[in-house]
Image: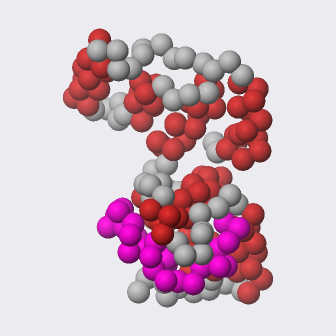
Amino acid sequence: MKLVASLSSSTTRTDFVKEVMKLPGGDKILDCIQCGLCAGSCPTRFSMDYSPVQLIKMIQLGMREDVLSSKTIWACATCQTCATRCPRNLDLTTLMLSLRNLAIKEDLADKRGVKPKFHKAFFDIVRKSGRLHEPTLQVRIIKKSDPKALARAAKLGLRLARKGKIRLRREKIEHTTDLSKMFEVTNEGDTE
Protein backbone atom coordinates (compact mmCIF):
# COMPACT_ATOMS: atom_id res chain seq x y z
CA MET A 1 0.00 0.00 0.00
CA LYS A 2 1.28 3.47 -0.88
CA LEU A 3 0.27 4.97 2.44
CA VAL A 4 3.44 3.88 4.21
CA ALA A 5 5.49 7.05 4.43
CA SER A 6 7.60 8.88 6.93
CA LEU A 7 5.35 10.87 9.21
CA SER A 8 6.32 14.19 10.67
CA SER A 9 5.94 15.28 14.25
CA SER A 10 2.58 15.08 16.00
CA THR A 11 2.14 18.86 16.07
CA THR A 12 2.67 19.14 12.31
CA ARG A 13 0.10 16.39 11.74
CA THR A 14 -2.53 18.08 13.88
CA ASP A 15 -1.75 21.44 12.25
CA PHE A 16 -2.54 20.00 8.82
CA VAL A 17 -5.75 18.35 10.06
CA LYS A 18 -6.86 21.65 11.63
CA GLU A 19 -6.03 23.49 8.41
CA VAL A 20 -8.07 21.01 6.33
CA MET A 21 -10.97 21.26 8.78
CA LYS A 22 -11.13 25.00 8.06
CA LEU A 23 -11.35 24.43 4.30
CA PRO A 24 -14.71 24.17 2.55
CA GLY A 25 -15.70 20.50 2.69
CA GLY A 26 -13.14 19.61 5.34
CA ASP A 27 -15.13 20.24 8.50
CA LYS A 28 -16.06 16.54 8.97
CA ILE A 29 -12.72 15.00 7.96
CA LEU A 30 -12.32 13.31 11.35
CA ASP A 31 -15.79 11.72 11.05
CA CYS A 32 -14.61 9.36 8.29
CA ILE A 33 -14.99 5.70 9.34
CA GLN A 34 -12.87 4.42 6.42
CA CYS A 35 -15.74 2.35 5.00
CA GLY A 36 -14.42 2.73 1.44
CA LEU A 37 -17.73 3.59 -0.23
CA CYS A 38 -16.14 6.67 -1.76
CA ALA A 39 -13.32 4.65 -3.30
CA GLY A 40 -15.57 1.83 -4.43
CA SER A 41 -17.99 4.12 -6.23
CA CYS A 42 -15.53 6.63 -7.72
CA PRO A 43 -15.66 6.56 -11.54
CA THR A 44 -12.19 8.13 -11.87
CA ARG A 45 -10.43 5.93 -9.31
CA PHE A 46 -8.45 4.23 -12.10
CA SER A 47 -6.55 7.48 -12.77
CA MET A 48 -5.75 8.31 -9.13
CA ASP A 49 -2.56 7.51 -7.29
CA TYR A 50 -4.48 7.19 -4.01
CA SER A 51 -8.13 6.31 -3.55
CA PRO A 52 -10.38 8.91 -1.87
CA VAL A 53 -10.45 6.87 1.36
CA GLN A 54 -6.64 6.66 1.34
CA LEU A 55 -6.42 10.41 0.80
CA ILE A 56 -8.68 11.03 3.80
CA LYS A 57 -6.47 8.77 5.93
CA MET A 58 -3.39 10.62 4.69
CA ILE A 59 -4.98 13.91 5.77
CA GLN A 60 -5.73 12.43 9.19
CA LEU A 61 -2.09 11.30 9.44
CA GLY A 62 -0.86 14.79 8.52
CA MET A 63 0.81 13.84 5.25
CA ARG A 64 0.54 17.37 3.87
CA GLU A 65 3.00 17.24 0.99
CA ASP A 66 1.81 13.82 -0.21
CA VAL A 67 -1.82 14.95 -0.16
CA LEU A 68 -1.24 18.28 -1.90
CA SER A 69 1.03 16.81 -4.58
CA SER A 70 -1.18 13.78 -5.30
CA LYS A 71 -2.86 13.22 -8.64
CA THR A 72 -6.03 12.21 -6.80
CA ILE A 73 -7.19 15.76 -6.11
CA TRP A 74 -6.83 16.60 -9.81
CA ALA A 75 -8.41 13.38 -11.10
CA CYS A 76 -11.61 13.99 -9.13
CA ALA A 77 -14.45 14.58 -11.60
CA THR A 78 -16.60 16.35 -8.95
CA CYS A 79 -19.48 14.03 -9.83
CA GLN A 80 -20.71 13.94 -6.20
CA THR A 81 -20.96 10.12 -6.17
CA CYS A 82 -18.71 9.86 -3.10
CA ALA A 83 -20.56 12.62 -1.24
CA THR A 84 -23.93 11.09 -2.05
CA ARG A 85 -22.96 7.65 -0.78
CA CYS A 86 -20.94 8.68 2.28
CA PRO A 87 -22.64 7.44 5.48
CA ARG A 88 -20.98 10.28 7.43
CA ASN A 89 -22.01 13.02 4.96
CA LEU A 90 -18.46 14.11 4.12
CA ASP A 91 -18.42 16.62 1.29
CA LEU A 92 -15.41 15.05 -0.38
CA THR A 93 -16.02 16.78 -3.73
CA THR A 94 -15.79 20.25 -2.21
CA LEU A 95 -12.77 19.15 -0.18
CA MET A 96 -10.99 18.00 -3.36
CA LEU A 97 -11.56 21.43 -4.91
CA SER A 98 -10.27 23.12 -1.75
CA LEU A 99 -7.19 20.89 -1.76
CA ARG A 100 -6.53 21.83 -5.40
CA ASN A 101 -6.54 25.50 -4.47
CA LEU A 102 -4.27 24.87 -1.51
CA ALA A 103 -1.88 22.86 -3.71
CA ILE A 104 -1.68 25.75 -6.14
CA LYS A 105 -1.06 28.26 -3.34
CA GLU A 106 1.64 26.05 -1.81
CA ASP A 107 3.18 25.40 -5.26
CA LEU A 108 2.89 21.63 -4.76
CA ALA A 109 0.67 20.86 -7.74
CA ASP A 110 3.52 20.15 -10.17
CA LYS A 111 5.55 17.82 -7.92
CA ARG A 112 4.25 14.61 -9.56
CA GLY A 113 3.67 15.92 -13.05
CA VAL A 114 0.19 17.31 -12.40
CA LYS A 115 -0.35 20.47 -14.38
CA PRO A 116 -3.13 22.64 -12.94
CA LYS A 117 -3.16 24.81 -16.06
CA PHE A 118 -6.85 24.16 -16.78
CA HIS A 119 -7.86 24.90 -13.18
CA LYS A 120 -5.96 28.20 -13.09
CA ALA A 121 -7.21 29.30 -16.50
CA PHE A 122 -10.82 28.39 -15.70
CA PHE A 123 -10.92 30.41 -12.47
CA ASP A 124 -9.04 33.34 -13.99
CA ILE A 125 -11.61 33.63 -16.80
CA VAL A 126 -14.56 33.32 -14.40
CA ARG A 127 -13.00 35.82 -12.00
CA LYS A 128 -12.56 38.41 -14.77
CA SER A 129 -15.89 38.13 -16.57
CA GLY A 130 -18.18 36.24 -14.22
CA ARG A 131 -18.76 33.32 -16.57
CA LEU A 132 -16.78 30.82 -18.56
CA HIS A 133 -15.84 31.65 -22.14
CA GLU A 134 -14.82 28.40 -23.86
CA PRO A 135 -12.76 29.94 -26.70
CA THR A 136 -10.64 31.88 -24.21
CA LEU A 137 -10.16 28.75 -22.10
CA GLN A 138 -9.12 26.76 -25.16
CA VAL A 139 -6.61 29.41 -26.19
CA ARG A 140 -5.13 29.46 -22.67
CA ILE A 141 -4.70 25.68 -22.33
CA ILE A 142 -3.84 24.52 -25.85
CA LYS A 143 -0.26 23.65 -26.63
CA LYS A 144 0.95 26.55 -28.77
CA SER A 145 3.84 24.58 -30.26
CA ASP A 146 1.49 22.10 -31.95
CA PRO A 147 0.22 23.68 -35.20
CA LYS A 148 -2.08 20.72 -35.95
CA ALA A 149 -3.82 21.07 -32.58
CA LEU A 150 -4.20 24.81 -33.12
CA ALA A 151 -5.73 24.25 -36.58
CA ARG A 152 -8.14 21.58 -35.26
CA ALA A 153 -9.22 23.82 -32.39
CA ALA A 154 -9.76 26.80 -34.70
CA LYS A 155 -11.75 24.70 -37.18
CA LEU A 156 -13.94 23.28 -34.39
CA GLY A 157 -14.41 26.72 -32.82
CA LEU A 158 -15.58 28.27 -36.08
CA ARG A 159 -17.96 25.35 -36.74
CA LEU A 160 -19.47 25.73 -33.25
CA ALA A 161 -19.74 29.51 -33.65
CA ARG A 162 -21.57 29.13 -37.00
CA LYS A 163 -24.09 26.81 -35.35
CA GLY A 164 -24.55 29.24 -32.46
CA LYS A 165 -23.14 26.84 -29.87
CA ILE A 166 -20.44 29.23 -28.64
CA ARG A 167 -19.91 32.96 -28.83
CA LEU A 168 -16.64 34.38 -30.03
CA ARG A 169 -17.05 37.55 -27.95
CA ARG A 170 -16.74 37.22 -24.21
CA GLU A 171 -19.81 38.20 -22.16
CA LYS A 172 -19.61 39.78 -18.72
CA ILE A 173 -22.06 39.59 -15.87
CA GLU A 174 -23.49 42.83 -14.51
CA HIS A 175 -22.50 42.63 -10.84
CA THR A 176 -18.79 41.82 -10.93
CA THR A 177 -18.30 43.38 -7.48
CA ASP A 178 -20.55 40.68 -6.00
CA LEU A 179 -18.47 38.05 -7.77
CA SER A 180 -15.25 39.59 -6.44
CA LYS A 181 -16.66 39.42 -2.92
CA MET A 182 -17.54 35.74 -3.39
CA PHE A 183 -14.01 34.94 -4.58
CA GLU A 184 -12.58 36.88 -1.68
CA VAL A 185 -14.69 34.97 0.85
CA THR A 186 -13.80 31.59 -0.65
CA ASN A 187 -10.14 32.51 -1.21
CA GLU A 188 -10.49 31.69 -4.91
CA GLY A 189 -9.23 35.13 -5.76
CA ASP A 190 -5.61 34.30 -5.00
CA THR A 191 -5.08 30.98 -6.79
CA GLU A 192 -2.33 32.44 -8.97
The vertical placement of 97 against 158, above or below, is below
Residue 44: x and y, percent? 36, 62
Query: In the rendered image, which quarter is residue 60 located in?
Result: bottom right
Quadrant of the rendered image containing residue 192: top right
Q: Position of residue 64 (x, y in %)?
A: 62, 72
Indicate yes or no whether the magenta region holds residue 27. Answer: yes
User: Residue at the location (35% across, 30% down)?
Assistant: 144
**What residue do we see at 60% from left, 79% from top?**
32
Q: Quadrant of residue 155?
A: top left
Q: Position of residue 81 (x, y in %)?
A: 44, 62
Q: Position of residue 110 (x, y in %)?
A: 50, 56
Q: Is residue 174 magenta?
A: no
Residue visible at 60% across and 69% down in the picture: 90
Q: Is residue 95 visible?
A: yes
- Is residue 66 visible to the viewer in this orientation of the structure? no
**Vertical side of 135 occupied by 76: above or below:** below
Q: Is the residue 82 above or below the residue 116 in the image?
A: below
Q: Quadrant of the N terminus?
A: bottom left
The answer to whether 56 appears left or right of 17 in the picture is: left
Q: How is the image coloured?
A: secondary structure
Magenta residues, as a range?
26-55
Q: How many marks?
A: 0
Between 35 and 64, the one lying in front of the other is 35
**In front: 46, or 64?**
46
Residue 19 lies left or right of residue 138; in this view the side is right
Q: Answer with left or right where residue 7 lies relative to residue 47.
A: right
Q: Residue at x 60, y 18 (%)?
A: 172
Q: Nearer the viewer, residue 165 or 47?
A: 165
